Image (cartoon, coloured by chain):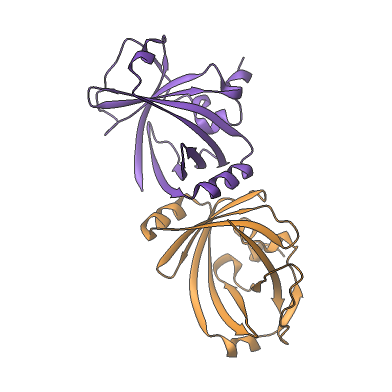
Chain colours: A orange, B purple
Amino acid sequence: MAVEIERKFLLKNDTWRCDIHRSTRIAQGYLCTDPERTVRVRVKGDAAFLTIKGKNSGISRSEFEYEIPLVDAVELLKLCPQVLDKTRHLLSMDQHTFEIDEFHGENAGLIVAELELASETSTYPQPEWLGAEVSGDARYYNSALSITPFSRWF
Amino acid sequence: MAVEIERKFLLKNDTWRCDIHRSTRIAQGYLCTDPERTVRVRVKGDAAFLTIKGKNSGISRSEFEYEIPLVDAVELLKLCPQVLDKTRHLLSMDQHTFEIDEFHGENAGLIVAELELASETSTYPQPEWLGAEVSGDARYYNSALSITPFSRWF
């Protein structure tokens, strides 16, 4: 088990694109979207993972991740009611790595930046493109986006 | 992925106990009990597993099982609303193995025999202690017993 401590932000503009050092397409679905316990199937490039996360406590939650065969993940995604499609862009900055998720399909138009931290009180870089923090806004949980995608918010 | 083809039976009497060749205590909980996709955490002796099963089609369903660290399973069971406690007894007979689950706790009094088969039409031994088949009765699904235990049926 690991503890995931993560902040999530909107983006003010597109200038972050100049600093991308890697981009990977991700397909992920949820076998369970209960906020008490989410179960995610993710295909990331040619690797696949099964991830269980516990309930959020502030910006922290327990996380259990297991690599699984890609062929299994392809079958497991068929058991998920919806599959999210996004591109994850990585940006390194001051010993931190921003993961910027650009969503496609029914969530197209939504871009969020995530930052894993060592503790809830860790300081972090604040580039000029970093927008409002939405860590506590449950609408932005990927599990929630699989049920109520961004295109249906308005 | 595997396909699980399994028949489940009640037991007429206790004579099966003479033929047990191994018994193991099992603790298991469900991260998801949706009949479309169950996610089970199981501790069996000193080994632990995460198992996803798809929807039943007759007596068949897809099954994905991964061994996970015991310490993870202990934490994952804490995320499950209920934990089933049972002893699994194994009985070999005519190249088949009956798995007889004797439930404890809130499901005490319930004993069921399960038999995995190579196909839906496979023949199987029918010892005199084998009672009514309940394969299609959703109340006997372990996921259902974790929500509505046997002691609350009557």
Outermost residue to the front: B46
Camera-side residue of A105 and B72:
B72
Quadrant the N terminus of chain A occupies: bottom right
Residue B52 is situated, as x and y percent measured from the top left of the image, at 46, 45
Residue B125 in view in this figure: yes
Q: Is residue B30 left or right of residue B112?
A: right
Residue B110 is situated, as x and y percent measured from the top left of the image, at 51, 18
Residue B14 is situated, as x and y percent measured from the top left of the image, at 41, 10
Residue B90 is situated, as x and y percent measured from the top left of the image, at 36, 26
Location of residue A153 with respect to B63 vertically, above or below: below
Camera-side residue of A149 and B3:
B3
Location of residue A48 with respect to B88 vertically, above or below: below
Q: Residue at x 71, y 73 (%)?
A: A9
Q: Quadrant of residue A96?
A: bottom right
Q: Residue at x 56, y 19 (%)?
A: B108
Residue A33 in view in this figure: no
Camera-side residue of B142 and A4:
A4
Outermost residue to the left: B94
